Image (tube, helix red, strand yellow):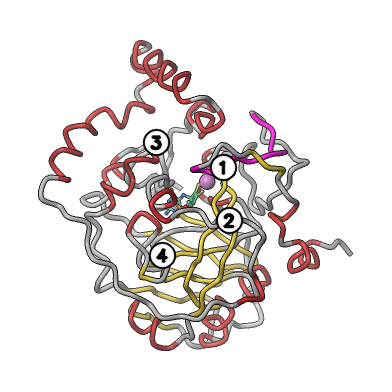
């Protein structure tokens, strides 16, 4: 691992549980502190950049994807409005400002797009995004997504079973974990120049978690291909874990025999663990996880163990 600067704990998403005006004041405070605050000010050049990149840059038209909804997984929560879910995103490669991700990410080019599947498998293969759409049956799944920062959405993903991809490449007996990587391209994603982070973003799952019936690789949302801010053209969706596990814009999937390290765990091991299963009883070191805010509403609701998916996943974590 290259030596990286580990951000002070105040850098991580505490702002999310902090009223906006307090956060803005803190930001000003850090700016006044100079060097110590330099990390969080990576976004200082943003207003210029934004003006530059939004001029004449119309949002691209999203291709429709036809996929029937799988009714088995419908949840008793109202769908988050598309424009709300699409304007409040975590995609640190672009910016740490959730409401600016969509605009900045519009610059991404997602065709052609290759996903290398390799490591401890009998049939390593590189899939083009169109292979993934053609070879694997796509279906719609309405899932909750719970960010570790205590906000939540409920959205209709379109995608295919991770387990179908796993079958196709035939893991060897030694394969116990899967490691995934996001793209590395600081021409699209300005915050990848920020050396406070160990780019590219990396995540991992046990093989059994990836094979679970809930785990999908999403290619679309709200009836069309993913817009860039949601992790186009293909991202993980694993709904019983905190949102940071659902890695966006995947370029590599690697089968390994050892538990891979993960982006947030490497940055702040005491705050973000490998498993990161949603659990209202285990507070984040800096805030409670007992409730969550449904974005776009004033509602705060109780958080549910495994984000409401216990019946599908509890067996994965039984000891003995
Ligand atoms: N590559 C990458 N993937 C990522 C992130 C990121 O910053 N970079 N953020 C994660 C976090 S913290 C959350 S909550 C979800 C947000 O997904 P959404 O913006 O599509 O709602 O994406 C996850 N995947
Ligand atoms: Mo998150």
Residue at 54% x, 30% y: name it: 14
Which of the two discs, 1 and 3, labels the residue nearer the N terminus? 1
Judging depth in this view, the residue of 237 and 186 nearest the camera is 237
Q: Residue 313 falls in which quadrant of the image? A: bottom right
Chain-order first, disc 2 or disc 4:
2
Q: Looking at the image, which residue is at 53% across and 50% down?
A: 244
Q: Is mark 3 within 8 Å of ligand 1?
A: no
Tag shown at residue 151 = 1
Q: Mark 4 sits on what residue?
A: 250
Considering depth in this image, is 290 or 284 the residue closer to the camera? 290
Principal secondary structure, stretch drawn in magenta: loop
Residues at marks 3 and 2, CA–CA distance in whole angstroms = 37 Å
Q: Position of residue 168 (x, y in %)?
A: 52, 88
Q: Earlier in the sequence, mark 4 or mark 3?
A: 3
Is residue 293 shown in magenta?
Answer: yes
Which of the labelled discs sits on residue 78, or is there none?
Answer: 2
Of badges 4 and 1, the one in the foreground is 1
| Residue wearing tag 3 | 196
Q: Nearer the viewer, mark 3 or mark 2?
A: 2
Distance CA(mark 1)–CA(mark 3): 25 Å
Q: Badge 1: few (under 14), some or many (20 or more) residues near its Cα, within 10 Å?
A: many
Residue 106 place in picture, x, y as percent: 25, 54
Tag in front: 1 or 3: 1
Q: Is residue 76 above or below residue 1?
A: below
Between tags 4 and 3, which lies in front? Answer: 4
Q: Magenta segment, which residues?
A: 287-296
**How dense is the environment of label 2, judged by Cα within 10 Å: few (below 14), some, or many (20 and up)?**
few
| Earlier residue among tags 2 and 1 | 2
Whole-number angstrom distance, CA of label 4 to CA of label 3: 21 Å
């Amino acid at each position: 691992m290259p030596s990286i600067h580990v951000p002070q704990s105040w850098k991580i998403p505490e702002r999310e549980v902090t009223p906006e005006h307090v956060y803005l004041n803190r930001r000003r405070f850090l700016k006044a502190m100079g060097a110590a605050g330099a990390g969080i000010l990576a976004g200082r050049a943003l207003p210029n950049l934004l003006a530059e990149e939004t001029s004449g840059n119309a949002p691209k038209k999203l291709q429709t994807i036809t996929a029937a909804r799988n009714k088995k997984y419908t949840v008793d929560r109202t769908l988050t409005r598309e424009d709300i879910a699409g304007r409040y995103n975590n995609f640190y490669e672009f910016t740490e400002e959730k409401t600016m991700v969509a605009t900045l990410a519009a610059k991404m080019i997602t065709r052609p797009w290759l996903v290398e599947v390799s490591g401890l498998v009998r049939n390593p293969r590189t899939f083009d995004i169109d292979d993934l759409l053609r070879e694997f049956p796509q279906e719609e799944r309405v899932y909750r997504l719970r960010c570790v920062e205590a906000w939540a959405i409920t959205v209709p993903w379109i995608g295919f079973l991770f387990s179908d991809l796993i079958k196709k490449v035939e893991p060897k007996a030694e394969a116990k974990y899967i490691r995934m990587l996001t793209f590395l391209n600081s021409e699209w994603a300005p915050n990848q120049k920020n050396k406070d982070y160990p780019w590219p973003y990396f995540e991992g799952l046990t093989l059994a978690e990836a094979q679970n019936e809930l785990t999908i690789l999403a290619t679309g949302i709200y009836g069309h291909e993913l817009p860039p801010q949601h992790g186009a053209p293909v991202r993980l969706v694993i709904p019983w874990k905190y949102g940071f596990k659902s890695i966006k814009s995947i370029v590599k999937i690697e089968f390994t025999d050892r538990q891979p390290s993960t982006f947030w765990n490497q940055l702040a091991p005491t705050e973000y663990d490998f498993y990161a299963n949603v659990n209202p009883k285990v507070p984040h070191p800096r805030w409670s996880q007992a409730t969550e805010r449904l974005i776009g509403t004033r509602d705060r609701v109780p958080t549910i163990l495994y984000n409401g998916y216990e019946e599908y996943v509890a067996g994965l974590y039984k000891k003995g």
